[in-house]
Amino acid sequence: MRAFLHGFGMHVPERVVTNAEIGARVDRTPEKIEGASGIRERRWAVAETSVADLALAAAQDCLTRTGVAASALGLIIVASGSARPGFPGPAAEVAVRLGLESTPAFDLPMASAGSLFGMAMAAQMAAHFGDVLVIGAEKMSAVIEAGALDPNTAILFGDGAGAVLISARSGPWEILDSVLHSDGQYRDALTFDWSAPLRMDGLSVILQAARKLPSSIEELLTRQKVAAADVAQFLLHQANQNLLVRVAKSLGVPAERVYSNVARYGNTSSASMLIAAAEWSQTNPATGPIVFSAFGAGFHWGALLARSV
């Protein structure tokens, strides 16, 4: 059973929120925000924009880039930790707005690691469903503005969506393997349920992420007998720049081998890894192994390895 990555797509809102703007609201200087996170600006959607709107735009971009008609899709997976509570989730709306009437679509309500888990699932399901579109979409501005702004979290997050097309048909990259992990004992370290402001134990989150991201990558590479030095690019959840640098150091690879756009978009939760992949793939040829990895609330984390065909 083989599965392939055919291409990526992305969408970010037009509005740019600078460190000066958000800093004025939380009594932080732009320099202090960038020093703590590596973030200089982020994108925020207007109030009327929904998670489904963002997801649809990224889906359409991915389909355009890959030259695949929406009617050819066999399954849609939408990962989001910021979709409004209740049912149905955004996946059903995305499907109908793509013109689909009976194509299965389901939601993964996971923050930060959702798109990675969706990709791993799609790789296993592509043999049965054919072309699978995985979307990570987040409106994190609504989450942080749901209550009084917390200076430690308000500075981090942005809005956006990313998408990837996975199929059993041959494509530019073959998915070789993936590892997924969860540890619910840390579930209270990063939580949000719309009834109270986002709660994050920053020290616990960063310590666990700095350990578990490289550990899962090393587990995967060891299993596939691939050296970290031979990986062309590491496409990670864009939590903050300091974490990306720590992961590169743990793996013993140059910092530039870990793709980073967090300075421009901030942390877009489950959208960030696919937004990074969409940007990276536009300017880089499909050569060498690539690794995807993410860590998020739950805690959930893991890695996925693909190689150019």
Image: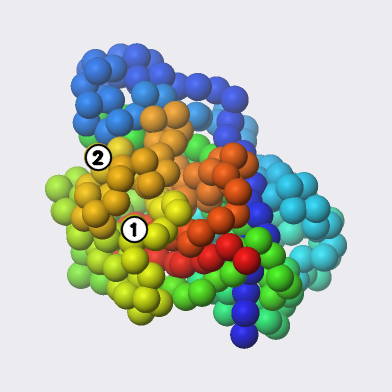
Image quadrant in which the N terminus is located: bottom right
Q: Residue at x 20, y 60 (%)?
A: 211
Expressed as whole percent of the image width and height from the top left, the position of residue 293 reads: 40, 59
Expressed as whole percent of the image width and height from the top left, the position of residue 124 reads: 57, 79
The 10 Å Cα crowd at callout 2, few under 14, some 14 to 19, many 20 or more, is: some
Expressed as whole percent of the image width and height from the top left, the position of residue 136 reads: 54, 53
In terms of secondary structure, where does tag 2 sit? Answer: helix
- 47 vs 57, left or right, is left
Expressed as whole percent of the image width and height from the top left, the position of residue 119 reads: 54, 66
Disc 2 vs disc 1: which is toward the camera?
1
Residue 296 picture quarter: bottom left
In terms of secondary structure, where does tag 1 sit? Answer: helix
Find out whether the residues at labels 2 and 1 contact each other: C-beta distance under 8 Å. no
User: In the drawing, what numbered circle is on residue 87?
Assistant: none
- 248 vs 68, left or right, is left
Q: Residue at x 40, y 36 (%)?
A: 262
Q: Label 2: which residue?
A: 242
- Is residue 264 placed above or below 244 in the rendered structure? above
Label 2 to label 1, Cα distance in Å?
20 Å
Image quadrant in which the C terminus is located: bottom right
The mark nearer the N terminus, 2 or 1, is 1
Residue 179 picture quarter: bottom left
Number of callouts: 2
Q: Label 1: which residue?
A: 229
Is residue 244 visible from the viewing direction of this image? Answer: no
Dot 2 amino acid type:
Asn
Q: Residue at x 34, y 14 (%)?
A: 20
The 10 Å Cα crowd at callout 1, few under 14, some 14 to 19, many 20 or more, is: few
Q: Which is nearer the eye, 270 or 263?
A: 263
Q: Residue at x 26, y 43 (%)?
A: 245
Dot 1 amino acid type:
Ala
